[in-house]
Image: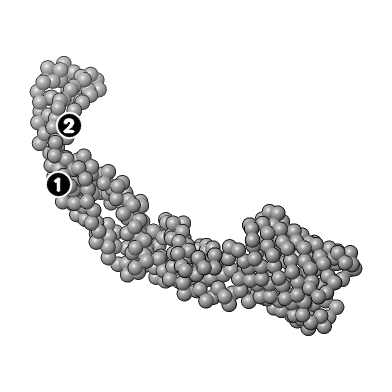
C-alpha cells in the first residue's frame, strides 16, 4: 500500500532489513542477496545458500512394538528397510543448524510419507542432528489388525485327503499377515500373497514333488486365505460315482497321469462299479492344443474299446466333450459342471439316444 517512489527510495534499507531477519530465523542458511523489483506488484527475490555443515548420511534405528508374530515382523522390517533410501532423501543436504527450526517440518513430511507407504501404523520420530543424522522410528500397529488367519487348501489335480496333510504348512506360511494392521494388509495384499507363496515354494516337499502354489487373501480381522496347490508334472484323482441311466449304478474311479511335456499327458484310469462290468482299466494319451481344447485317445486294456475324444474345459470340473467309439462307431456328447468344490454332475447322450446322468464326488 506504500507509494512506489517511497519504496524505491527505501530499497536499500528494505533489502538490508529482510536479509537480517532471514539470517536470524533461518539458521543454517546464509542470505547471499536480496533484490527488489519495484512496481504495482513488487517482487522480492532472496538468494540463500546452505552452510557447509550439512547432513551427509542418515542412519535409521527402529523400535517396533505390538507385532507378536515373527513372520509378520520379519516381513514388515524388510518392507520398511526398502523405504530407508526414500526417507533419507528428506534429510540429505539439510544444514545441521537448520534443524533448530526445520525439525517439525521435516518430521511431519516423514510421517506423511510413512503413512502413505505403511497405512495402519503409528509413527513417532526422534532426530539427533549431526552430519550423520540419527533417526529413531518408534512404530506400533493401530487397530483394527488381523487377529487370525483361516486357511483353506485345495487342489484340482490331487485328492483332498492328500493336500489336507499340507494344511499346517499352509497355515504357517500365511501367518505372515497375523497381527498386521488391516489397512496395511489391504494396501500390500498382492505383495503379501507373493510372500506366502514364496514361503510355501521354499518347503522341501515343494521341490520333491514339483508343487506349484498360489495364495489368495481376503483381508479382514479374520483373514481368509485360499491356498491352491497343483503338481507341475503329474495328477491324481479319486472319485466316487452315482449314475442314473437304464439302471442305477454306484462306482468309484482312480486316475493318475504324468505330463512329460507341457502339452502331453499319459494317464491310466481304474474304474469299479456295480453295473456288472466289474473292473475296467484304461490308458489315455492327451494333447492340450490350448487351455480351452484337449484331444485324446483312450484304450481299454483287456477289452475291445478304443475312443477318440475332444474336450472343451470351462473350469476345473466344468467341460463340454465329444467322444467317438472307434469299434462301434457310436458318437456321444457330454456336459459337466461343478455343483460345489468337490461335487460335479455330468449329463451324457449318445447316437443311440441313450441318456446318462452321473454325480461324482471327488475325495
The location of residue 246, given as percent across then percent down, is 85, 78
Q: Is residue 162 left or right of residue 222?
A: right
Quick one: label 1, few (<14), some, or many (20+) residues within 10 Å?
A: some
Q: Judge whether 205 appears above or below 35 on screen.
A: below
- The residue to which callout 1 is attached is 130
State the image quarter where residue 271 is shown.
bottom right
Which residue corresponds to the image point at 69% horizontal and 67% vertical from the top-left?
267
Q: Secondary structure at mark 2?
A: strand
- The residue to which callout 2 is attached is 49
| Nearer to me, 305 or 349 | 305
Q: Secondary structure at mark 1?
A: loop
**Whether residue 174 is visible:** no
State the image quarter where residue 66 is shown.
bottom left
Quick one: label 2, few (<14), some, or many (20+) residues within 10 Å?
A: few
Q: Are marks 2 and 1 in contact (CB under 8 Å)?
A: no
Q: Is residue 188 left or right of residue 83?
A: right
| Nearer to me, 34 or 357 | 357
Amino acid at each position: 500500500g506504500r507509494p512506489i517512489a517511497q519504496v524505491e527510495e527505501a530499497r536499500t534499507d528494505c533489502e538490508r532489513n529482510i536479509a537480517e531477519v532471514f539470517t536470524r530465523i533461518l539458521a543454517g542458511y546464509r542470505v547471499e542477496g536480496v533484490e527488489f523489483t519495484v512496481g504495482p506488484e513488487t517482487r522480492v527475490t532472496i538468494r540463500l545458500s546452505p552452510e557447509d555443515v550439512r547432513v551427509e548420511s542418515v542412519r535409521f534405528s527402529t523400535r517396533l512394538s505390538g507385532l507378536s508374530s515373527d513372520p509378520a515382523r520379519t516381513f514388515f522390517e524388510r518392507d520398511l528397510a526398502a523405504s530407508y533410501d526414500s526417507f533419507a532423501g528428506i534429510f540429505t543436504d539439510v544444514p545441521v543448524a537448520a534443524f533448530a527450526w526445520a525439525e517439525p517440518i521435516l518430521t511431519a513430511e516423514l510421517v506423511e510419507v510413512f503413512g502413505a507407504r505403511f497405512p495402519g501404523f503409528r509413527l513417532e520420530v526422534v532426530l539427533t542432528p549431526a552430519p550423520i543424522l540419527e533417526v529413531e522410528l518408534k512404530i506400533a500397529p493401530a487397530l483394527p489388525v488381523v487377529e487370525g488367519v483361516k486357511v483353506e487348501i485345495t487342489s484340482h489335480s490331487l485328492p483332498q485327503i492328500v493336500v489336507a496333510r499340507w494344511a499346517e504348512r499352509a497355515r504357517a506360511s500365511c501367518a505372515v499377515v497375523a497381527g498386521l494392521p488391516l489397512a496395511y494388509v489391504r494396501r500390500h495384499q498382492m505383495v503379501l500373497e507373493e510372500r506366502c507363496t514364496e514361503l510355501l515354494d521354499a518347503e522341501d516337499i515343494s521341490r520333491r514333488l514339483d508343487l506349484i502354489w498360489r495364495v489368495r487373501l481376503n483381508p479382514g480381522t479374520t483373514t481368509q486365505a485360499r491356498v491352491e496347490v497343483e503338481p507341475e508334472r503329474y495328477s491324481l484323482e479319486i472319485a466316487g460315482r452315482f449314475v442314473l441311466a437304464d439302471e442305477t449304478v454306484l462306482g468309484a474311479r482312480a486316475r493318475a497321469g504324468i505330463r512329460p511335456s507341457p502339452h502331453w499327458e499319459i494317464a491310466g484310469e481304474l474304474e469299479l462299479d456295480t453295473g456288472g462290468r466289474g473292473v475296467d482299466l484304461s490308458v489315455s494319451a492327451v494333447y492340450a492344443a490350448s487351455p480351452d481344447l484337449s484331444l485324446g485317445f483312450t484304450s481299454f486294456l483287456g477289452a475291445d474299446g478304443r475312443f477318440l475324444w475332444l474336450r472343451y474345459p470351462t473350469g476345473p470340473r466344468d467341460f463340454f466333450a465329444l467322444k467317438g467309439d472307434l469299434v462301434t462307431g457310436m458318437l456321444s456328447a457330454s456336459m459337466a459342471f461343478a455343483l460345489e468344490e468337490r461335487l460335479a454332475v455330468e449329463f451324457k447322450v449318445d447316437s443311440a439316444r441313450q441318456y446318462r446322468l452321473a454325480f461324482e464326488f471327488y475325495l
